[in-house]
Image (tube, rainbow, N blue to C red):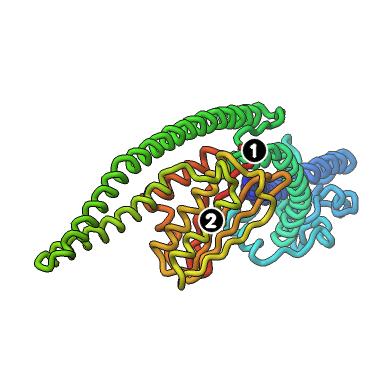
Amino acid sequence: MRLVLQLVARLFVVVILCLGAATVWATIDAHRSVDRATAASAERVSVALEALYWRELLLRSNRMREQLLPTPEWRTIETMALISPGICVRFEPAGAFEKPLCGQNKGIGQSPPRWFAATVQTLLGDHPAIVRPISTRTANAGSVSAAADPNAAIALAWQHILDNIHVALLMAVAIALLASLAIAHTLAPAQQIVAALQRMARGQYSTSLPRFRSMDLAMIGQAVGDLGDRLAQSMDERAALTRRLLEIRSDERRALARELHDEFGQNLTAILAFANTIETTSAREKDKSEVAQDARMISQATHRIMACLRDTLNRLRHPPAEELGLEACLVDLVDSWRSRNATQPMIQLDLKGDLADVRGAVAATAYRVAQECLTNSLRHSSARVIVLRIERRTGAENALLVHVEDDGGGDAAKVACSPGFGLTGIRERVAALGGSLSIADANRGVSVAATIPLAA
Protein backbone atom coordinates (compact mmCIF):
# COMPACT_ATOMS: atom_id res chain seq x y z
CA MET A 1 0.00 0.00 0.00
CA ARG A 2 1.22 3.48 -0.82
CA LEU A 3 2.47 5.67 2.00
CA VAL A 4 -0.20 8.33 1.39
CA LEU A 5 -2.97 5.74 1.62
CA GLN A 6 -1.46 4.29 4.80
CA LEU A 7 -1.31 7.70 6.46
CA VAL A 8 -4.84 8.58 5.35
CA ALA A 9 -6.12 5.22 6.62
CA ARG A 10 -4.44 5.80 9.99
CA LEU A 11 -5.85 9.31 10.06
CA PHE A 12 -9.36 7.97 9.55
CA VAL A 13 -8.81 5.44 12.33
CA VAL A 14 -7.75 8.29 14.64
CA VAL A 15 -10.80 10.31 13.56
CA ILE A 16 -13.11 7.37 14.29
CA LEU A 17 -11.51 6.88 17.72
CA CYS A 18 -11.88 10.60 18.46
CA LEU A 19 -15.47 10.47 17.27
CA GLY A 20 -16.14 7.55 19.60
CA ALA A 21 -14.52 9.43 22.48
CA ALA A 22 -16.63 12.47 21.63
CA THR A 23 -19.76 10.30 21.70
CA VAL A 24 -18.87 8.98 25.16
CA TRP A 25 -18.11 12.49 26.38
CA ALA A 26 -21.38 13.80 24.92
CA THR A 27 -23.30 11.02 26.66
CA ILE A 28 -21.74 11.80 30.04
CA ASP A 29 -22.22 15.53 29.53
CA ALA A 30 -25.86 15.01 28.56
CA HIS A 31 -26.42 12.96 31.70
CA ARG A 32 -24.83 15.68 33.82
CA SER A 33 -26.78 18.40 32.00
CA VAL A 34 -30.01 16.76 33.17
CA ASP A 35 -28.71 16.89 36.75
CA ARG A 36 -27.77 20.53 36.27
CA ALA A 37 -31.18 21.30 34.82
CA THR A 38 -32.81 19.53 37.78
CA ALA A 39 -30.81 21.57 40.30
CA ALA A 40 -31.47 24.82 38.42
CA SER A 41 -35.21 24.11 38.27
CA ALA A 42 -35.32 23.35 41.99
CA GLU A 43 -33.37 26.56 42.74
CA ARG A 44 -35.60 28.77 40.57
CA VAL A 45 -38.84 27.34 41.95
CA SER A 46 -37.61 27.58 45.54
CA VAL A 47 -36.73 31.25 45.05
CA ALA A 48 -40.13 31.94 43.53
CA LEU A 49 -41.95 30.15 46.33
CA GLU A 50 -39.85 31.96 48.92
CA ALA A 51 -41.05 35.28 47.56
CA LEU A 52 -44.59 33.96 47.55
CA TYR A 53 -44.17 32.73 51.12
CA TRP A 54 -43.09 36.10 52.49
CA ARG A 55 -45.82 37.88 50.60
CA GLU A 56 -48.44 35.59 52.09
CA LEU A 57 -46.86 36.04 55.51
CA LEU A 58 -47.11 39.83 55.30
CA LEU A 59 -50.61 39.93 53.84
CA ARG A 60 -52.11 37.27 56.08
CA SER A 61 -50.34 37.75 59.37
CA ASN A 62 -53.31 36.47 61.29
CA ARG A 63 -52.96 32.99 59.72
CA MET A 64 -50.73 30.22 60.94
CA ARG A 65 -47.43 29.93 59.16
CA GLU A 66 -48.10 26.27 58.43
CA GLN A 67 -51.12 27.32 56.36
CA LEU A 68 -49.28 29.82 54.19
CA LEU A 69 -47.95 27.28 51.66
CA PRO A 70 -48.73 25.71 49.40
CA THR A 71 -51.18 28.14 47.96
CA PRO A 72 -53.04 27.64 44.70
CA GLU A 73 -51.12 30.54 43.24
CA TRP A 74 -47.83 28.64 43.04
CA ARG A 75 -49.04 26.20 40.35
CA THR A 76 -49.09 28.80 37.60
CA ILE A 77 -47.72 29.18 34.11
CA GLU A 78 -45.02 31.45 35.48
CA THR A 79 -43.85 28.68 37.79
CA MET A 80 -43.88 26.15 34.95
CA ALA A 81 -41.69 28.51 32.95
CA LEU A 82 -39.10 28.15 35.69
CA ILE A 83 -38.99 24.38 35.29
CA SER A 84 -36.72 22.89 32.61
CA PRO A 85 -38.21 20.42 30.12
CA GLY A 86 -38.33 16.88 31.47
CA ILE A 87 -38.09 18.02 35.14
CA CYS A 88 -40.88 17.58 37.68
CA VAL A 89 -41.13 19.70 40.85
CA ARG A 90 -43.03 18.76 44.02
CA PHE A 91 -43.72 20.80 47.15
CA GLU A 92 -42.77 19.12 50.41
CA PRO A 93 -44.67 18.31 52.50
CA ALA A 94 -47.02 17.38 49.73
CA GLY A 95 -50.72 17.62 50.11
CA ALA A 96 -53.20 14.85 49.50
CA PHE A 97 -53.64 13.90 45.86
CA GLU A 98 -51.16 16.58 44.84
CA LYS A 99 -49.30 15.83 41.61
CA PRO A 100 -45.88 17.19 40.78
CA LEU A 101 -45.61 20.15 38.47
CA CYS A 102 -43.66 19.08 35.38
CA GLY A 103 -42.03 20.99 32.57
CA GLN A 104 -42.95 20.45 28.96
CA ASN A 105 -42.04 16.92 27.83
CA LYS A 106 -43.41 16.89 24.33
CA GLY A 107 -41.03 17.64 21.48
CA ILE A 108 -37.93 17.65 23.65
CA GLY A 109 -36.16 15.09 21.46
CA GLN A 110 -36.37 11.94 19.40
CA SER A 111 -37.21 8.64 21.00
CA PRO A 112 -33.85 6.98 21.73
CA PRO A 113 -33.04 3.35 20.83
CA ARG A 114 -33.56 0.76 23.51
CA TRP A 115 -29.91 -0.20 23.58
CA PHE A 116 -28.95 3.40 24.29
CA ALA A 117 -31.44 3.72 27.14
CA ALA A 118 -30.27 0.40 28.61
CA THR A 119 -26.58 1.36 28.26
CA VAL A 120 -27.02 4.76 29.90
CA GLN A 121 -29.11 3.27 32.69
CA THR A 122 -26.49 0.56 33.34
CA LEU A 123 -23.39 2.72 33.17
CA LEU A 124 -24.57 6.08 34.56
CA GLY A 125 -27.52 5.08 36.76
CA ASP A 126 -30.57 7.15 37.76
CA HIS A 127 -30.71 10.89 38.24
CA PRO A 128 -30.88 11.87 41.93
CA ALA A 129 -33.65 14.14 43.22
CA ILE A 130 -32.66 17.69 44.24
CA VAL A 131 -34.19 19.21 47.40
CA ARG A 132 -34.07 22.94 48.10
CA PRO A 133 -35.61 24.68 51.15
CA ILE A 134 -38.03 27.48 50.37
CA SER A 135 -36.48 29.71 53.01
CA THR A 136 -33.39 29.14 55.05
CA ARG A 137 -34.70 31.49 57.80
CA THR A 138 -37.70 29.35 58.65
CA ALA A 139 -38.07 25.60 58.45
CA ASN A 140 -41.87 25.84 58.48
CA ALA A 141 -41.93 27.13 54.91
CA GLY A 142 -41.25 23.63 53.44
CA SER A 143 -39.00 22.61 50.58
CA VAL A 144 -38.99 22.02 46.85
CA SER A 145 -38.03 18.62 45.45
CA ALA A 146 -37.09 18.38 41.77
CA ALA A 147 -36.51 15.10 39.91
CA ALA A 148 -35.94 14.23 36.30
CA ASP A 149 -38.47 12.19 34.36
CA PRO A 150 -36.45 9.06 33.31
CA ASN A 151 -37.94 8.83 29.83
CA ALA A 152 -37.61 12.55 29.22
CA ALA A 153 -34.04 12.52 30.57
CA ILE A 154 -33.04 9.74 28.17
CA ALA A 155 -34.69 11.56 25.28
CA LEU A 156 -32.90 14.79 26.20
CA ALA A 157 -29.56 12.95 26.43
CA TRP A 158 -30.12 11.31 23.05
CA GLN A 159 -31.01 14.63 21.45
CA HIS A 160 -27.97 16.25 23.04
CA ILE A 161 -25.75 13.48 21.65
CA LEU A 162 -27.26 13.79 18.17
CA ASP A 163 -26.69 17.55 18.15
CA ASN A 164 -23.08 17.20 19.28
CA ILE A 165 -22.29 14.20 17.12
CA HIS A 166 -23.59 15.88 13.98
CA VAL A 167 -21.27 18.79 14.56
CA ALA A 168 -18.40 16.52 15.57
CA LEU A 169 -18.98 14.30 12.53
CA LEU A 170 -18.93 17.25 10.16
CA MET A 171 -15.78 18.57 11.80
CA ALA A 172 -14.15 15.12 11.68
CA VAL A 173 -14.94 14.69 7.99
CA ALA A 174 -13.65 18.18 7.22
CA ILE A 175 -10.48 17.62 9.24
CA ALA A 176 -9.91 14.21 7.64
CA LEU A 177 -10.33 15.58 4.12
CA LEU A 178 -8.16 18.62 4.72
CA ALA A 179 -5.51 16.53 6.48
CA SER A 180 -5.58 13.99 3.65
CA LEU A 181 -5.03 16.75 1.11
CA ALA A 182 -2.23 18.16 3.25
CA ILE A 183 -0.60 14.72 3.57
CA ALA A 184 -0.90 14.04 -0.16
CA HIS A 185 0.56 17.45 -0.96
CA THR A 186 3.38 17.01 1.53
CA LEU A 187 4.29 13.53 0.31
CA ALA A 188 3.92 14.32 -3.39
CA PRO A 189 7.72 14.70 -3.74
CA ALA A 190 8.07 11.11 -2.52
CA GLN A 191 6.77 9.94 -5.90
CA GLN A 192 9.55 11.87 -7.61
CA ILE A 193 12.09 10.30 -5.27
CA VAL A 194 10.71 6.81 -5.99
CA ALA A 195 10.78 7.51 -9.74
CA ALA A 196 14.40 8.64 -9.42
CA LEU A 197 15.30 5.43 -7.55
CA GLN A 198 13.56 3.38 -10.24
CA ARG A 199 15.55 5.16 -12.94
CA MET A 200 18.71 4.43 -10.96
CA ALA A 201 17.69 0.76 -10.80
CA ARG A 202 17.46 0.79 -14.62
CA GLY A 203 20.97 2.23 -14.86
CA GLN A 204 20.23 5.97 -15.13
CA TYR A 205 22.35 6.96 -12.18
CA SER A 206 22.74 10.70 -12.82
CA THR A 207 19.27 11.71 -11.73
CA SER A 208 18.58 15.28 -10.64
CA LEU A 209 15.76 16.08 -8.22
CA PRO A 210 14.19 19.48 -7.56
CA ARG A 211 14.65 21.31 -4.30
CA PHE A 212 11.83 20.26 -1.98
CA ARG A 213 10.31 22.59 0.58
CA SER A 214 10.20 19.98 3.31
CA MET A 215 13.56 19.78 5.05
CA ASP A 216 13.38 16.00 5.53
CA LEU A 217 12.38 15.33 1.91
CA ALA A 218 15.02 17.80 0.73
CA MET A 219 17.66 15.86 2.69
CA ILE A 220 16.40 12.57 1.21
CA GLY A 221 16.43 14.05 -2.29
CA GLN A 222 19.95 15.35 -1.79
CA ALA A 223 21.06 11.94 -0.51
CA VAL A 224 19.48 10.21 -3.53
CA GLY A 225 21.21 12.65 -5.89
CA ASP A 226 24.57 12.14 -4.19
CA LEU A 227 24.07 8.38 -4.28
CA GLY A 228 23.29 8.53 -8.00
CA ASP A 229 26.42 10.59 -8.67
CA ARG A 230 28.58 8.16 -6.71
CA LEU A 231 27.01 5.18 -8.47
CA ALA A 232 27.54 6.82 -11.86
CA GLN A 233 31.16 7.50 -10.98
CA SER A 234 31.63 3.94 -9.69
CA MET A 235 30.02 2.46 -12.80
CA ASP A 236 32.21 4.59 -15.05
CA GLU A 237 35.30 3.46 -13.15
CA ARG A 238 34.11 -0.12 -13.25
CA ALA A 239 33.42 0.10 -16.99
CA ALA A 240 36.87 1.57 -17.57
CA LEU A 241 38.49 -1.19 -15.52
CA THR A 242 36.44 -3.82 -17.33
CA ARG A 243 37.44 -2.41 -20.72
CA ARG A 244 41.05 -2.42 -19.61
CA LEU A 245 40.68 -6.00 -18.39
CA LEU A 246 39.13 -7.01 -21.69
CA GLU A 247 41.96 -5.35 -23.58
CA ILE A 248 44.49 -7.25 -21.46
CA ARG A 249 42.52 -10.44 -21.98
CA SER A 250 42.42 -9.84 -25.72
CA ASP A 251 46.17 -9.29 -25.77
CA GLU A 252 46.63 -12.50 -23.83
CA ARG A 253 44.32 -14.36 -26.21
CA ARG A 254 46.23 -13.09 -29.21
CA ALA A 255 49.53 -14.03 -27.60
CA LEU A 256 48.17 -17.46 -26.73
CA ALA A 257 46.85 -17.87 -30.28
CA ARG A 258 50.28 -17.04 -31.68
CA GLU A 259 51.94 -19.51 -29.33
CA LEU A 260 49.50 -22.24 -30.23
CA HIS A 261 49.86 -21.55 -33.92
CA ASP A 262 53.61 -21.29 -33.91
CA GLU A 263 54.42 -24.10 -31.49
CA PHE A 264 51.57 -26.61 -31.61
CA GLY A 265 50.79 -25.97 -35.26
CA GLN A 266 54.32 -26.59 -36.41
CA ASN A 267 54.78 -29.63 -34.16
CA LEU A 268 51.47 -31.11 -35.32
CA THR A 269 52.49 -30.51 -38.93
CA ALA A 270 55.78 -32.26 -38.24
CA ILE A 271 54.01 -35.18 -36.56
CA LEU A 272 51.68 -35.47 -39.53
CA ALA A 273 54.61 -35.45 -41.94
CA PHE A 274 56.46 -38.12 -39.96
CA ALA A 275 53.33 -40.26 -39.76
CA ASN A 276 52.78 -39.98 -43.52
CA THR A 277 56.41 -40.92 -44.16
CA ILE A 278 56.18 -43.95 -41.86
CA GLU A 279 52.91 -45.01 -43.48
CA THR A 280 54.33 -44.69 -46.99
CA THR A 281 57.55 -46.52 -46.11
CA SER A 282 55.78 -49.30 -44.22
CA ALA A 283 53.25 -49.80 -46.96
CA ARG A 284 56.05 -50.92 -49.30
CA GLU A 285 57.09 -53.64 -46.93
CA LYS A 286 54.45 -56.29 -46.45
CA ASP A 287 55.73 -57.45 -43.09
CA LYS A 288 55.27 -53.96 -41.60
CA SER A 289 51.56 -53.50 -42.31
CA GLU A 290 50.78 -53.03 -38.63
CA VAL A 291 53.23 -50.14 -38.45
CA ALA A 292 51.53 -48.52 -41.44
CA GLN A 293 48.15 -48.90 -39.77
CA ASP A 294 49.46 -47.26 -36.58
CA ALA A 295 50.94 -44.43 -38.60
CA ARG A 296 47.60 -43.97 -40.36
CA MET A 297 45.83 -43.74 -36.98
CA ILE A 298 48.42 -41.17 -35.83
CA SER A 299 47.68 -39.14 -38.96
CA GLN A 300 43.94 -39.26 -38.32
CA ALA A 301 44.40 -38.22 -34.68
CA THR A 302 46.70 -35.42 -35.79
CA HIS A 303 44.10 -34.17 -38.28
CA ARG A 304 41.49 -34.11 -35.51
CA ILE A 305 43.81 -32.23 -33.19
CA MET A 306 44.62 -29.73 -35.94
CA ALA A 307 40.90 -29.18 -36.61
CA CYS A 308 40.29 -28.61 -32.91
CA LEU A 309 43.27 -26.28 -32.81
CA ARG A 310 41.87 -24.27 -35.73
CA ASP A 311 38.56 -23.87 -33.88
CA THR A 312 40.39 -22.79 -30.77
CA LEU A 313 42.46 -20.29 -32.71
CA ASN A 314 39.33 -18.88 -34.31
CA ARG A 315 37.83 -18.30 -30.89
CA LEU A 316 41.03 -16.87 -29.45
CA ARG A 317 41.79 -14.47 -32.24
CA HIS A 318 40.18 -11.05 -32.38
CA PRO A 319 36.76 -11.34 -34.03
CA PRO A 320 36.84 -10.07 -37.62
CA ALA A 321 33.78 -7.95 -36.89
CA GLU A 322 36.02 -5.13 -35.72
CA GLU A 323 37.61 -4.83 -39.13
CA LEU A 324 35.29 -6.47 -41.66
CA GLY A 325 31.92 -5.34 -40.27
CA LEU A 326 29.28 -7.02 -38.17
CA GLU A 327 26.86 -8.14 -40.86
CA ALA A 328 29.38 -10.04 -42.99
CA CYS A 329 30.88 -11.73 -39.95
CA LEU A 330 27.49 -12.86 -38.64
CA VAL A 331 26.57 -14.32 -42.03
CA ASP A 332 29.91 -16.16 -42.10
CA LEU A 333 29.39 -17.38 -38.52
CA VAL A 334 25.94 -18.80 -39.29
CA ASP A 335 27.14 -20.38 -42.56
CA SER A 336 30.02 -22.08 -40.75
CA TRP A 337 27.66 -23.59 -38.18
CA ARG A 338 25.25 -24.64 -40.90
CA SER A 339 28.02 -26.41 -42.80
CA ARG A 340 28.94 -28.39 -39.68
CA ASN A 341 25.34 -29.32 -38.86
CA ALA A 342 23.73 -30.18 -42.18
CA THR A 343 20.53 -31.64 -40.73
CA GLN A 344 19.66 -30.08 -37.39
CA PRO A 345 19.27 -27.60 -35.93
CA MET A 346 18.08 -25.01 -38.40
CA ILE A 347 19.69 -21.61 -37.74
CA GLN A 348 17.71 -18.53 -38.77
CA LEU A 349 19.48 -15.19 -39.11
CA ASP A 350 17.31 -12.08 -38.95
CA LEU A 351 19.03 -8.71 -39.48
CA LYS A 352 17.08 -5.48 -39.00
CA GLY A 353 18.32 -1.96 -39.49
CA ASP A 354 21.50 -0.55 -40.99
CA LEU A 355 24.50 -2.45 -39.63
CA ALA A 356 27.06 -1.13 -42.10
CA ASP A 357 28.64 1.39 -39.74
CA VAL A 358 28.54 -0.81 -36.63
CA ARG A 359 32.21 -1.53 -35.99
CA GLY A 360 34.77 -1.45 -33.25
CA ALA A 361 34.05 -2.63 -29.73
CA VAL A 362 30.28 -2.72 -30.27
CA ALA A 363 30.60 -5.00 -33.30
CA ALA A 364 33.11 -7.23 -31.51
CA THR A 365 30.86 -7.55 -28.45
CA ALA A 366 27.77 -8.31 -30.54
CA TYR A 367 29.72 -10.93 -32.46
CA ARG A 368 30.98 -12.54 -29.25
CA VAL A 369 27.46 -12.64 -27.80
CA ALA A 370 26.06 -14.27 -30.94
CA GLN A 371 28.98 -16.71 -31.11
CA GLU A 372 28.71 -17.76 -27.46
CA CYS A 373 24.92 -18.13 -27.54
CA LEU A 374 24.99 -20.20 -30.72
CA THR A 375 27.73 -22.40 -29.27
CA ASN A 376 25.75 -23.01 -26.08
CA SER A 377 22.53 -23.77 -27.97
CA LEU A 378 24.26 -26.21 -30.30
CA ARG A 379 26.31 -27.99 -27.66
CA HIS A 380 24.07 -28.01 -24.61
CA SER A 381 20.53 -28.33 -25.96
CA SER A 382 18.52 -30.45 -28.34
CA ALA A 383 17.25 -27.47 -30.27
CA ARG A 384 15.68 -27.92 -33.67
CA VAL A 385 15.42 -24.22 -34.50
CA ILE A 386 17.72 -21.42 -33.35
CA VAL A 387 16.81 -17.84 -34.17
CA LEU A 388 19.54 -15.18 -34.17
CA ARG A 389 18.09 -11.68 -34.44
CA ILE A 390 20.22 -8.55 -34.70
CA GLU A 391 18.30 -5.26 -34.60
CA ARG A 392 19.56 -1.72 -34.68
CA ARG A 393 17.27 0.63 -32.77
CA THR A 394 17.52 4.29 -33.57
CA GLY A 395 16.08 7.35 -31.89
CA ALA A 396 16.34 7.94 -28.20
CA GLU A 397 17.30 4.31 -27.51
CA ASN A 398 20.17 4.21 -30.08
CA ALA A 399 21.24 0.67 -29.25
CA LEU A 400 22.01 -2.66 -30.84
CA LEU A 401 19.87 -5.62 -29.79
CA VAL A 402 21.26 -9.16 -30.02
CA HIS A 403 18.61 -11.80 -29.40
CA VAL A 404 19.15 -15.56 -29.54
CA GLU A 405 16.28 -17.97 -28.90
CA ASP A 406 16.08 -21.75 -29.23
CA ASP A 407 13.46 -24.46 -28.70
CA GLY A 408 15.73 -26.95 -26.98
CA GLY A 409 14.18 -26.73 -23.53
CA GLY A 410 16.37 -25.73 -20.65
CA ASP A 411 15.88 -23.63 -17.54
CA ALA A 412 16.68 -19.93 -17.83
CA ALA A 413 17.34 -19.61 -14.09
CA LYS A 414 19.96 -22.38 -14.19
CA VAL A 415 21.53 -20.91 -17.30
CA ALA A 416 21.73 -17.46 -15.69
CA CYS A 417 23.42 -18.93 -12.61
CA SER A 418 25.82 -21.04 -14.65
CA PRO A 419 29.44 -20.60 -13.49
CA GLY A 420 30.77 -21.04 -17.03
CA PHE A 421 33.27 -18.56 -18.42
CA GLY A 422 31.34 -18.01 -21.63
CA LEU A 423 28.31 -16.23 -20.21
CA THR A 424 30.46 -14.47 -17.64
CA GLY A 425 32.68 -13.14 -20.40
CA ILE A 426 29.89 -11.78 -22.60
CA ARG A 427 28.13 -10.33 -19.55
CA GLU A 428 31.32 -8.46 -18.67
CA ARG A 429 31.75 -7.28 -22.26
CA VAL A 430 28.19 -5.97 -22.46
CA ALA A 431 28.45 -4.28 -19.06
CA ALA A 432 31.73 -2.64 -20.04
CA LEU A 433 29.92 -0.89 -22.90
CA GLY A 434 27.07 0.22 -20.63
CA GLY A 435 24.60 -2.39 -21.89
CA SER A 436 22.53 -5.11 -20.29
CA LEU A 437 22.14 -8.87 -20.69
CA SER A 438 18.98 -10.78 -19.81
CA ILE A 439 18.25 -14.52 -19.84
CA ALA A 440 14.60 -15.63 -19.81
CA ASP A 441 12.44 -18.63 -20.61
CA ALA A 442 11.10 -18.79 -24.17
CA ASN A 443 8.14 -20.76 -25.49
CA ARG A 444 10.10 -24.00 -25.78
CA GLY A 445 13.58 -23.09 -24.67
CA VAL A 446 15.78 -20.25 -23.49
CA SER A 447 16.04 -16.68 -24.75
CA VAL A 448 19.16 -14.50 -24.36
CA ALA A 449 18.93 -10.79 -25.15
CA ALA A 450 21.75 -8.25 -25.02
CA THR A 451 21.29 -4.51 -25.46
CA ILE A 452 24.46 -2.61 -26.40
CA PRO A 453 24.41 1.20 -26.62
CA LEU A 454 25.79 2.40 -29.95
CA ALA A 455 27.24 5.46 -28.26
CA ALA A 456 29.71 3.25 -26.39
276 to 218, vertically: above or below: below
Name the spot of residue 20 as percent of width and height, x first: 64, 51
Name the spot of residue 400 as percent of width and height, x first: 62, 48
202 to 228, vertically: above or below: below
Image quarter for residue 132? top right
- Secondary structure under badge 2? helix
Sequence-wise first label, 1 or 2: 2
103 to 199, vertically: above or below: below
State the mark number for residue 332: 2
> Residue at coordinates 33% horizontally, 42% vertically from top-left?
260
Front residue of 113/246: it is 246
Foreground mark, 1 or 2, reads 2
Name the spot of residue 187 as percent of width and height, x first: 68, 39
Callout 1 touching callout 2 (CB < 8 Å):
no
The C terminus, quarter of image = top right
> Residue at coordinates 51% horizontally, 69% vertically from top-left?
346
State the mark number for residue 330: none
Q: Is residue 294 left or right of residue 82?
A: left
Q: In this view, does 43 lie to the left or right of 32?
A: right
The residue indicated by pointer 1 is 455
Front residue of 425/219: it is 425
Which residue is situated farthest in the front direction here? 284
Name the spot of residue 180 as percent of width and height, x first: 72, 44
